[in-house]
Amino acid sequence: MRKSLSEKTPKELLDLCLQMAKYKKENKEYLTYLIYEAPNEEAYIEGIKRFMTAEFDNLDRSSFYRLKKNVRKTLRACIKYIRYSKKKATEAELRLTFCRELVRMTPSLKRSTILKNIYHQQLKMVRKAVDKLHEDLQFDYEEEIQALEAAYRRRSL
């Protein structure tokens, strides 16, 4: 595939990209990320954080079934945005934000084993991403993780 693409002219490559973006929503979103958002990763992260906060503020709390379903939907979107970026710092930041929102959410996590498991799994993945970062960033993120765990324990009591 790489060889075939290298033999194409720039116009043919442009046409191929536009055709791919035309048929799949995720292709279009990824292309948008690469063109407009990748150069300014900080703004990208802030936009996703605002999106997650809004999603958690608008959760359907009529039943735990709907609550869990909406939390999972938000998590899927978060994972999709992490996949676009492919940067471990972005992954750590977005997963930490997800966990913060989960702890902040009402009703509390303590009433749902599934939500607690989601929280612990995401925290484990944050630690995994943080381990691959520079030592200074690791220290900063480790402090945030400790603060998040303290907030979780206070909320769970």
Image (tube, rainbow, N blue to C red):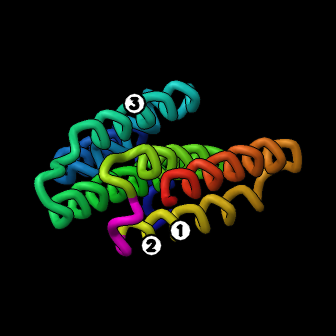
User: Where are the magenta residues, as a range?
Assistant: 109-114
> Quadrant of residue 130 in the image?
bottom right
Which residue in the structure is indicated by mark 3?
Answer: 50
Q: Which mark is residue 120?
A: 1
Rendered location of residue 11, percent (x, y): 35, 37
Q: Which mark is residue 117?
A: 2
The type of residue carrying mark 2 is Asn
Q: Residue at x 35, y 73 (%)?
A: 114
> Quadrant of residue 57 in the image?
top left
Q: Earlier in the sequence, mark 3 or mark 2?
A: 3
Count all numbered tags in the image, as a single digit.
Answer: 3
Asked whether the residues under the numbered discs 2 and 1 touch, taking CB atoms below 8 Å apart as contact, a structural biologist would say yes
Badge 3 marks a residue whose secondary structure is: helix
Disc 1 residue crowd, few under 14, some 14–19, many 20+, Cα 10 Å: some
Badge 1 marks a residue whose secondary structure is: helix
Residue 90 lies left or right of residue 127; in this view the side is left
The type of residue carrying mark 1 is His
> Which residue ends up furthest to the front in the rendered image?
157
Q: Is residue 119 magenta?
A: no
